[in-house]
Image (spheres, helix red, strand yellow):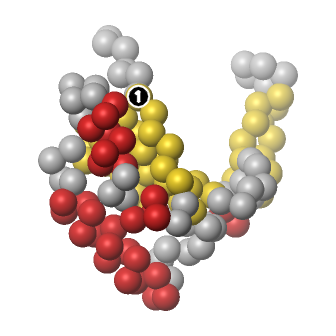
Amino acid sequence: MPSYIALIYNADVDWSAAEHSETMAEYGEFGRAAAAVIRGGAALYPTSTATTVRVHGGKGGDVVTTDGPYAETKEALTGFYLFECADLDEAVATAARIPGARDGAIEVRPVIPPMQR
């Protein structure tokens, strides 16, 4: 069965803060309701905690880090789910039930399976 990632874009907030407990409870309800297809996922800390990594000069080049996110945007990547669904239609229907879809956006993409060794 194919896998899909659902990337959640919302306002850049700290989901671990007490003022977001009601929303996090809604995510818990979604997780229980969609447990049959969820294979992983997590909420992310705010972009202020991010470190961007680049390698200059190709393979073996200099590693350069920058505090903060790669891009400044109105909405930030705030979490993700990994689904295993029959097809894209099922993945989209599941993503539409994510609480963040009501005030943000959910990007659904198929996942390329790891190469067999």
What percent of the width, then of the height, locates residue 31?
25, 60
Quarter of the N terminus within the rendering: top left
State the residue position of label 1: 111
| Left or right of 10 in this view: 94 | left
The answer to whether residue 21 is above or below residue 11 is: below
Q: Residue at x 59, y 73 (%)?
A: 13
Whether residue 64 appears in this view of the structure is yes
Q: Secondary structure at mark 1?
A: loop
Q: Residue at x 48, y 50 (%)?
A: 106
How many other residues sit within 10 Å of disc 1, few (<14), some (14-19) or many (≥20)?
few
Q: Viewer-proximal residue, 68 or 20?
A: 20
Judging depth in this view, the residue of 32 and 60 nearest the camera is: 32
Q: Residue furthest bottom?
A: 19
Residue 46 relative to residue 102: left or right: right
Picture quarter containing residue 14? bottom right
Q: Quadrant of residue 45?
A: bottom right
* Residue drawn at the location 39% of the way across and 65% of the way down: 99
